[in-house]
Image: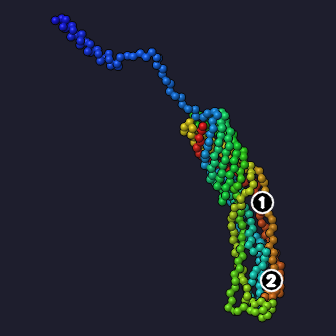
Amino acid sequence: MKKLTLTFCALFALFAAAPAIFADGPEQYSGKKEVMQPAPPSCDLYRAHEWDLGIWAAFAFASDTGQFDVPEVDPFFPDTDPSTVDIGTGFNQEQRFQNPDERVNLGQVSKNQLFARDDAWGGGVDVKYFWSRYFGAGLEGVGFAAKTNFAGGGLATLTARYPIGRFAPYIWGGLGFIHGGATTYKFFNEKATKQAVGSTLPGGAPGLFPGGVSPYTNLFNVNEQEFWTTDPISNHHVRGLGQLGIGAEFRVTCHIGLMADVSWNFVFGHDDHNQIFQITNQGSNITNFFGTQIASTPVVNTALGLNPANGSDHQDFGMVRFGVTFSY
């Protein structure tokens, strides 16, 4: 009886210990020591030997803003147009002068001589190579929508940056060229148009009137219209361009960043100031009697015109840029 009791106790102890012994299965030994793998290192956001491609929009604002007050005047003095008058009929016939379509530059309107207005939108692209984390060199191309035409150029640049985590404040400078743009000027315009004079009388035959001309044959009234326009004159010379700026970049990933900066741009080089010159408009007041000339009086009108410049004065501008960079 004691043996039976001991046997049941031994079996009970065995069944109680079995789940704990075989819970993880039998242990196997591989003979190799297990090594813990470290976490992969984070990328270096700003690196030496790095190529950067920047694509950006730009807003430029002129250093000289506003407009000059150029009055709307007739520049010719005395303002007497040559004409032909037939005193036998009383009709004003064809006016006679050398330049019936007058166009005179009265003066500069826009103070800025690059955009022909106070500001302009544009954009550009630049490529930089950083030989260290802190210094790089590159090329930049920029263009602006000036009034009625395009102004653009290119520069070689040097950049210094100081990475702080994902941010990298930077400064840069560049030298290059710019071309295009315009200046607006006010023009006096006078257009002459001839209008035939109608008549109910039949045309005359040769011999009926002195000189063989009927007073009602080929008669005209000349109408002149004066008006003023403000027109851009394009710049035609390449000028030097200097650039100094400061900004910051924020790296969203190891290879993509956002940038914003502001710069001041100096335009220099070609110098061709506005030139004033005199315009002479000559003709004769002719008096006819029934188609025959009986008197002729010379008429000389003069005016001062402006030969527009293509210089670099009043073309400096500021520029704000914002865009995206791709780093490799």
The residue sitting at 81% across, 71% down in the picture is 280
**Mark carried by residue 286:** 2
**Given contact means CB atoms under 8 Å apart, are the residues at marks 2 and 1 in contact?**
no
Q: Is residue 21 left or right of residue 263?
A: left
Q: Quadrant of the C terminus?
A: top right
| Residue found at the far top of this picture | 2
Q: Secondary structure at mark 1?
A: loop
Residue 181 position, x and y percent, is 69, 56
Residue 250 position, x and y percent, is 57, 39
**Mark carried by residue 274:** 1
User: Looking at the picture, which amino acid does disc 1 mark?
Assistant: Asn
Q: Quadrant of residue 310?
A: bottom right
Q: Residues within 10 Å of mark 1 (few under 14, many from 20)?
A: some
The residue sitting at 77% across, 85% down in the picture is 85
From the viewer's perspective, is residue 82 above or below residue 118? below
Q: How far apart are the alpha carbons under marks 2 and 1?
A: 38 Å
Q: Quadrant of residue 288?
A: bottom right
Q: Secondary structure at mark 2?
A: strand
Q: Quadrant of the N terminus?
A: top left
Residue 225 position, x and y percent, is 69, 75
The residue sitting at 74% across, 92% down in the picture is 204
User: Which of pointers 2 and 1 lies earlier in the amino acid sequence?
Assistant: 1
Q: Can residue 328 be spotted in the picture?
A: yes
User: Looking at the picture, which amino acid does disc 2 mark?
Assistant: Ile
Residue 80 position, x and y percent, is 77, 77
Q: Quadrant of residue 112?
A: bottom right
The residue sitting at 50% across, 27% down in the picture is 39
In this figure, which colouring scheme has been used for the structure? rainbow
Name the foreground residue: 5 vs 83. Answer: 5
From the viewer's perspective, is residue 78 above or below residue 288? above
